[in-house]
Amino acid sequence: MEAWKVHKFGGSSVADAACMQRVARIIEGDPATRKAVVLSACRGVTDALLSLISLAERQDPTLEDRIQELRQRHVGIARELLTDDLYDEFVLQLDQDCHDITGILQTVRLVRSASTTLRDLISGYGELWSTRIFERLLRRRGLSSGRVQWVDARKVLLVEWGPLGPGIRWDQSRENLRGQVVPDFVGTLVVTGFIATDTQGLQTTLGRNGSDFSASIFGSLLDAREIVIWTDVDGVLSADPRLVPEAQVIDALSYNEAMELAYFGAKVIHPQTMAPAVHKRIPIWIKNTFAPEKAGTVIHDKTAPSPLVKGITTVEKIALLNLEGAGMIGVPGTAHRLFGALREEGISVILISQGSSEHSICFAVPEVEAERAERVVRRAFDPELREGQIQSIEVNRGCSILAVVGDGMAGAHGVSAQVFSALGKASVNVRAIAQGASERNISVVIDGRSSARALRAVHSSFYLSAHTVSIGLVGPGLVGSALLDQVASQVERLRRDFKLDLRVRGIAGSKTMRLVQGEVDLERWREEYAAGEGPVDLERFADHVHADQIPHAVIVDCSADAEVATRYAHWLSEGIHIVTPNKKANSASYDYYERLRDARRAAGSHYLYEATVGAGLPVIQTLRDLRETGDEIRRIEGMFSGTLAYLFNTWDGSQSFSSVVRHAKSLGYTEPDPRDDLSGMDVARKLIILGREMGLRRELADVEGESLVPAALQKCGIEDFLERLSEFDAPMLARLQDARARGQVLRYVGSVGADGKAKVGVVELPASHPFANIALTDNIVRFQTARYDKNPLIVQGPGAGPAVTAAGVFADLLRVCAYLGAKL
């Protein structure tokens, strides 16, 4: 004869008439000929029944109204689902139950107290009502696969409560079932979940997750081939989807994996409720009532080595207690005294961690138990505390436990390193660590405020979800706009091909900023930014970008603002990564430059600024590679300004020098204020950046420079400057003509040597010189080193323009993501 199949439906699955119809269709669609259907009460009914007891204890006058509300809810469901005769049968029983409840609660009202037995009696009515409706619904629908029989679990399950909860009297329960269901029964049993009978013959419940437990028990009693737990999720997820939206349904879990995940808060069948099924090796399926076509998750006795990590979960509102003292070292029985005292007080310990020195023991308890746990421990070790053998008992509240679970972790190299690397990159501090000898669980205690960020970081590090990066862009000007457009064109490809989720969550200009809880729609970022707010608050902006729920935060500064640059050190110290083409920070005072480096090292933050020199050209990276491989940098010289390269490449005297400057600005080849280019200050800043990368301690004032900005125009407004620059065209034209007469060309060149001397200015070069033969806006940089002495190393390419500069910034952004663990 075909083996039984057990289905269990929770409260959300039978919440109303429509839900019950859905459940009926699922049962009818199951081809199994022998099925047992275990139901919970309709959603919220058990809580409503328990609230009746509270109302009675308070002698609340609304008690009768609340009873009638429960009656009307079930009458309404029955009226929708049942024909007249079946409906009348149900309502007759329902009215008798409500009469009984009223009588019981009248007793409670008089004595103002309810015993555990009374609470169990009242709270169990919900399952009686839901199953009676459902059994009649199946009969009304004419279920084709045999008979339909209602089974009152109180007449089957005999339990005895002990320290570990309800224990099943298996032999008696099995005998009781044979008395209720004939051995050759073919059809569908509709079974009340949650309720049972104790050894005194009184109604009791199976406690928390009691209906799941009922399903597992009946699965064992019936020797079922499988148990299906129907819920409102698609299966067991790799993480909490509220914190990790990309959490995936796990195809299969071993019993041990499921128990570990459930213990640490995952939405899985409770470990205790699985025990009967585990004992009989019955597979348990977790499926979605509202999407029955989804495959779901199977929990069984098989272990799959891949993936290494199946799920990551957290337990919130934890307190960590630490007992510390030299007097504990080598003293046997300390742990026994500690945990024995806690056991006597009924305090559950969630996690234990002890160093091999035995100098300290720390353990985690629910935060609500922290104060009581501290009192218990202080009382237990009072003599040692007074004598100084134990120095301290510390309590850290507001913690969380993050647990990484997977059978495949056993014996696998580098799993712990990957966990702690992910936490470190997300700036999450670990306070305590615990791992069992089975190696299927690594648990860490962290600050509760970092819980979401930690969960996302570790989840993505094992490729269970995308690496999520929160991005804030400062300066949506020419370069910033080009960058956002470039990111928009690639964001879907990066998410699809590399599991990299770039989320622009803030854009800040000089007067307006736009902050978004989710992410800016990059296809229409201009409209979103236009709807922003003012004034700009960069502190609030950074706090928003550095969200607790997202593991990594990057601020991309595409402005040329010195005030923004002054915030870099603080942002880096807070664990925010920075990518920028803004030269103001690295060319500021050397003291501030050192602060940036110290802040980056202390917080483990990343600070990338390749685009500060040469736009998208690998100038800084080339310099670093030369130095890190032991080369000696003797001299760097070049044309570092795409703007000035463009001016001296295109100006042939047929147009005025001032008109060429205005045209270059219109093309986006100049800084917002062209005087930053013409003054040589932009080139000087680049020389200082390169000099510091060479290891030179130089200040901007140390650069000897030639400015092309007339003294009379240095302090006027930008528009004024552009209008009046033509007044000084004649001297520039004369200089060009003199150079031509000697067969030379004019170029604006900067150089810095190992001796620290740095200089920028216009020089005359022969027409055959490499600097005289470059494309319009090219930068060209020559590295003269010990290895590249006679034939210097040259890096050349476009060095100006929003697109190429943005591309250099984008490349740095992707490098940061790679450092954070993205596989690009």
Image (cartoon, rainbow, N blue to C red):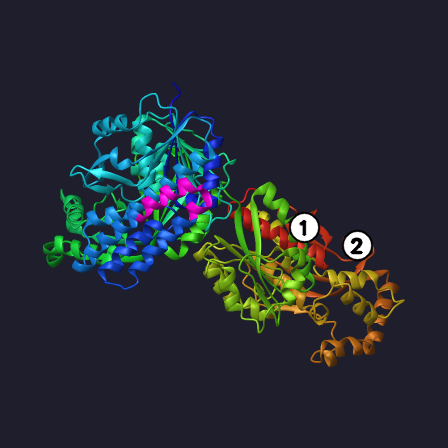
Q: Amino acid at mark 2?
A: Ala
Q: Nearer the viewer, residue 196 or 529?
A: 196
- Do residues under tags 1 and 2 come within 8 Å of each other at their CB atoms? no
Mark 2 is surrounded, within 10 Å at the Cα level, by few (under 14), some (14 to 19) or many (20 or more) other residues, namely some
| 1 vs 2, front mark | 1
Split into 4 quadrants, where in the image is the N terminus?
Answer: top left
Split into 4 quadrants, where in the image is the C terminus?
Answer: top right
Q: Tell me: residue 136, above or below residue 369.
A: above
> Which x, y percent locates residue 716?
71, 80
**360 left or right, relative to 483:** left
Look at 56% across and 61% down and name the residue there: 516
> Does the image show residue 116?
yes
State how far apart marks 1 and 2 are (Cα).
28 Å
The question of residue 90 being in magenta is answered with yes
Look at 17% across and 37% down and name the residue there: 199
**689 left or right, relative to 346:** right
Q: If you read the primary sequence from the N terminus, does the residue marked by circle 1 or circle 2 appear first? A: 1
Q: Which residues are magenta?
A: 77-95
> Which x, y percent locates residue 74?
39, 48
Magenta region, main secondary structure: helix
Q: Which residue is mark 2?
A: 775
Q: Amino acid at mark 1?
A: Ser
> Does the image show residue 635?
no
> Which x, y percent locates residue 742?
86, 63
Q: Tell me: residue 10, above or below residue 696.
A: above
User: SS at mark 2?
Assistant: loop
Q: Which mark is residue 489?
A: 1
Q: Tell me: residue 370, above or below residue 511.
A: above
